[in-house]
Image: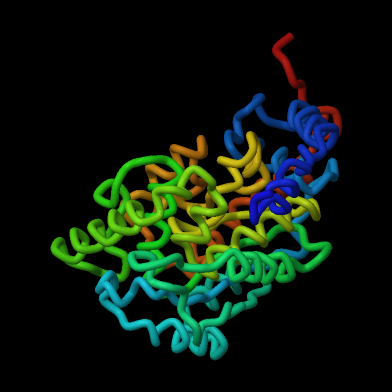
Amino acid sequence: MSEFDDLRARVRTFGTGGAAAEAAVRARQDTLTKPPGSLGRLEDLAAWLARWQGRAMPRLDRVEIVVFAGNHGVVAQGVSSFPAEVTAQMVGNFAAGGAAINQLARVAGAGLRVVPVEVARPTGDFTVGTAMSADEFRAAVAVGNDAVTPGIDLLCLGEMGIGNTTVAAALAAALFGGGGAAWAGRGTGLDQAGVARKAAVIDRGLARHEAVLADPLAAAAALGGRELAAILGAVMAAREQGVPVLLDGFVCTAAAAPLAVLARGGLDHALVAHVSAEAGHRRLVAALGQTALLDLGMRLGEGSGAALAVPVLRAAVACHSGMASFAEAGVSDRAG
């Protein structure tokens, strides 16, 4: 028995969504007053929402953004231009309404919650030991499980944690191959020497934990962070509750990526909201077989890209539900 067999068993029981609901959306799309497929990806998004909400007429009445925060022992290796205490300070800024995500959540018409995950207790430095024990990892996954509000229509995920682009890069390398140089980026603003140092730190971590890297969950515990584990738990709970998910940037995508490795279709209910300017994110999105909804050169985190993608989904739902059919509008749908 592996320490994570129960989590693997949950992934194996993931449903495949409402195929009939998706088919109904696509059938309706063919009757609307437009050439077939002329709304491009908006049509696919309406069908995707229908499938994972399990309803033929998707809706976005209740949208929530959840931002998980955590700290990382690997910061001691000089991988960030900001100190670890900034994580707790930014949590306070979120609570006061002063961060970018506060403004973007309002624009998106979404609720916002920030969930600190033992911010005062950083994970272990993965260059000298494991980031989390199995029990610590499972506890953080449980925080994410419990953070998903039953009955919501869409979950947007974000994160805050000084040093977490380093752990995301290490986890991406463990899951999809390549060393630190392939995945390390500027993070909070490192210069070229800082990025090289970060890549070397990642390589040391990969070498230390080589024996467990073939197991996505063991790799996530050995290299990851509590906020990443909470994101993983939230994505799992969303699948089980019939809630589609928007992932933010590099850290969120890496946090959820073990599900795609554990099971074919394990992330089908989650879309990457935007491709980050952080080095490695575009490569990670491609490894998952996805195409991000937006590409705006952002690398802030906080769920900012996910929040920005919500109006795109709202547009998809509005067109699908509000447009008239050819019959209703008295418009001929084919040349005579």
All told, the count of numbered labels is: 0
* Residue 135 visible in the picture: yes
82, above or below 234, in the image = below
Provide residue 175's location: percent of width, then percent of height: 46, 44
- Seen at 73% across and 58% down, the residue is 237
The spot of residue 118 in percent (x, y) is 56, 81
- The residue most toward the top is 336
Front position in the image: 188 or 233 = 233
Q: Is residue 314 visible?
A: no
Outermost residue to the left: 193
Q: Residue at x 63, y 34 (%)?
A: 264
Q: Nearer the viewer, residue 109 or 159?
A: 159
Colouring mode (rainbow / by chain / secondary structure / one colour): rainbow
Image position of 206 (left or right of 334)? left
Q: Is residue 266 left or right of residue 99?
A: right
Residue beneath the point at 74% across and 46% down: 9
Image position, residue 113 (x, y; %): 64, 77
Q: Is residue 280 left or right of residue 151?
A: left
Which image quarter is the C terminus in?
A: top right
At 51% from the left edge and 57% from the top edge, which residue is drawn?
Answer: 220
- Determine which quarter of the picture holds residue 117: bottom right
Nearest the eye: 211 or 75: 211
Left or right for 252, reference 32: left
Q: Position of residue 103 (x, y in %)?
A: 53, 76
